[in-house]
Image (tube, rainbow, N blue to C red):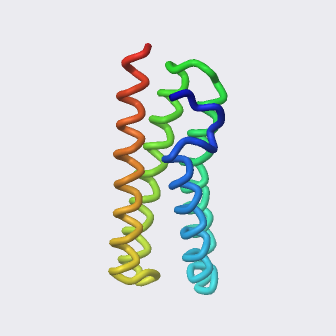
Amino acid sequence: MKINSFEEIEVWQKARVFTQEIYKICKVLEKNREFSLSEQIKRASISIMANIAEGFARRTNKEFVQFLFIAKGSAAEVQNYIYVMLDLKFIDENTFIKLKEDIIVMQKMLSGFIKYLRKTI
């Protein structure tokens, strides 16, 4: 199957929905004047989407793989920040579990995509 645009990539779609969730949660951070943490997690979340899109636009699988690794790193960064939010009681355990599950799914999808693309390099 040929992918014609980054919007067709399932992990990008998941990252888009995830970013919307992060923005909703950040409203709580901002009410508590935690602007720095809020900005960091929003940037990292957006970075997942952006690196998938930018990698796709490069039009070579080698470069695409590099950008997918960066997206995977951004996902790990978000995962770190959700631990901070849990520890500081900005999110509850259930929210943490849901966010962590979503991040793990995206990381696995990115790993699978990387593995697939590396076979074609």
At horizontal 59% and vertical 56% (from top left) the residue drawn is 16
State the image coordinates of residue 90 (x, y, percent, origin top left).
46, 82
Q: Nearer the viewer, residue 41 or 36?
A: 41
Instruction: Tell me if residue 94 comes above or below residue 70 in the rendering.
Output: below
Figure quadrant of residue 24: bottom right
**Residue extending farthest top:** 121
Q: Would residue 9 be found to the left or right of residue 110 on screen?
A: right
Q: Residue at x 60, y 66 (%)?
A: 20
Q: Position of residue 59 (x, y in %)?
A: 62, 21
Residue at the front extreme?
1
Q: Looking at the image, is 98 positioned above or below residue 67? A: below
**Image quadrant where residue 109 sits:** top left
Report the residue at 41% width, 80% height from top.
88
Q: For the C terminus, which image quadrant?
A: top left
Examine the image and state in which quarter residue 36 appears.
bottom right
**Would residue 113 appear left or right of 16 to someone viewing this image?**
left
Q: Residue at x 58, y 48 (%)?
A: 49
> Looking at this view, is 27 or 97 the one in front?
97
